[in-house]
Image (cartoon, grey):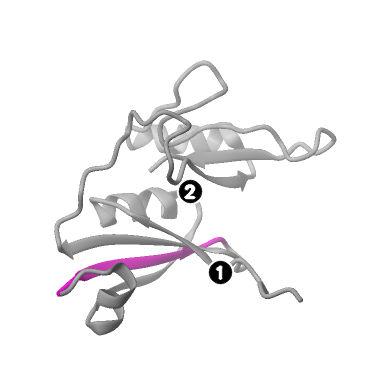
């Protein structure tokens, strides 16, 4: 029996919800709006009493798997480890197929994001990954948060 029906969402905790949301909206994701979450449900899910977070749900045009961005107001967020080695446990990247990789990179550059060289692997906010199949000319954006 298969229990999973679909891939619903990926949640990422960020320090600056507005800035990170704007980055993804600028690339073409659509925001469902910002909302605050607190109370027994959140306390149970994260295992901390008195927690409060603001979240933004972002979807690709036409629907699909959602990216849930969350920023905690209680308790304070803990700093991440941007220099973490690849074998450290945790989320490594989120990848999106884009129509024009260079245009996406140029768009992000306007807001100060940069692509690290060499072309692969990338580390900061915008990066290209190999297409899923060699005969396809798909391009990808990988966003490290």
Quick one: SS at disc 2? helix
For disc 2, the neighbor class at 10 Å (few under 14, some 14 to 19, many from 20) is some
Residue at mark 1 to residue at mark 2: CA–CA distance: 20 Å
Q: Which residue is mark 1?
A: 8
Q: Earlier in the sequence, mark 1 or mark 2?
A: 1
Q: Is residue 15 left or right of residue 124?
A: left
Indicate whether residue 61 is drawn in magenta: no
Q: Which residue is mark 2?
A: 27
> Where 60 falls versus 97 (above or below)?
below
x and y, in percent, of residue 34 in the image: 31, 71
Q: Is residue 23 above or below residue 33?
A: above
Tell me which corner region of the image, top left, top right, bottom left or bottom right, holds residue 11: bottom left
**Residue lying furthest bottom in this view?**
40
Task: Please say if 44 is above or below 13.
Answer: below
Q: Main secondary structure of the magenta part?
A: strand
Boundaries of the magenta span: 50-60
From the top left corner, tell me how far across and down residue 62 is, in percent.
Answer: 62, 67
> Could you say whether the residue bearing mark 1 is in a helix, strand or loop?
loop
């Amino acid at each position: 029996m298969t229990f999973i029906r679909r891939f619903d969402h990926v949640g990422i905790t960020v320090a600056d919800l507005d800035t990170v949301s704007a980055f993804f909206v600028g690339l073409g994701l659509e925001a469902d709006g910002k909302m605050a979450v607190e109370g027994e449900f959140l306390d149970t899910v994260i295992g901390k009493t008195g927690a409060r977070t603001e979240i933004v749900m972002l979807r690709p045009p036409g629907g699909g798997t959602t990216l849930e961005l969350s920023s905690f107001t209680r308790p304070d967020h803990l700093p991440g480890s941007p220099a973490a080695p690849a074998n450290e446990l945790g989320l490594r990247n989120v990848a999106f197929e884009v129509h024009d990789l260079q245009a996406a990179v140029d768009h992000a550059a306007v807001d100060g994001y940069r692509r690290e060289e060499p072309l692969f692997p990338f580390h900061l906010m915008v990066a290209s990954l190999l297409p899923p199949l060699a005969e396809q000319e798909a391009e990808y954006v990988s966003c490290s948060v």
